[in-house]
Amino acid sequence: MSHRSPEQSLLAGTLTTFRRRCGKPSCRCAAGDPHETPALRYTEGGRTKLITLAAADVAEVAAALARYQQARAALDAAAAEGVAALQSRLAARRAGSRA
Ligand SMILES: [Zn+2]
């Protein structure tokens, strides 16, 4: 299995913020705002999963998500071209058989 470098890696999912109370009675979160941690939400086998991130990881994850979106848009465009090409080949064949 080959691994892409971080500069090339792809990620499908969304960046989100994971909020939680740590459970320590003396912590500020017991009465106030919960702790907030950046996280990647993604689905695997139909289940939503969450990976909590360090703040330093967010930019890299966001870039990998953007690369995935670009790659998917390019694939979708190529597939649409494929449909158009197939339709024009079939139309040309029908026109040819009539001649
Ligand atoms: Zn806490």
Image: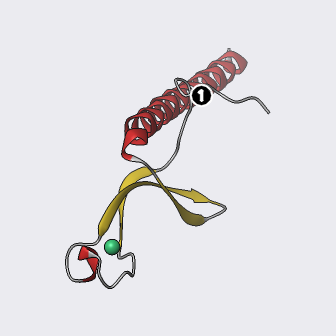
Q: Is residue 74 above or below residue 68?
A: above
Residue lying at 42% horizontally and 48% vertically, measured from the top left: 54
- Within 10 angstroms of label 1, few (less than 14), some, or many (20 or more) residues? few
Residue lying at 42% horizontally and 32% vertically, measured from the top left: 63
Q: Residue furthest front?
A: 26
Instruction: Give the labeled residue for mark 1.
Output: 87
Residue lying at 50% horizontally and 26% vertically, measured from the top left: 74
Residue lying at 45% horizontally and 39% vertically, measured from the top left: 61
Q: Where is residue 85 shown, x and y percent of the image?
A: 59, 22
Q: Quadrant of residue 91?
A: top right
Q: Where is residue 75 shown, x and y percent of the image?
A: 55, 30
Q: Is residue 22 above or below residue 73?
A: below
9 lies left or right of 33? right
User: Which three-letter amino acid code belongs to the residue tagged 1?
Assistant: Gln
Q: Which color scheme does this rendered protein use?
A: secondary structure
Along the line of sight, the residue nearer the viewer: 99 or 69: 69
Give the quadrant of the N terminus.
Answer: top right
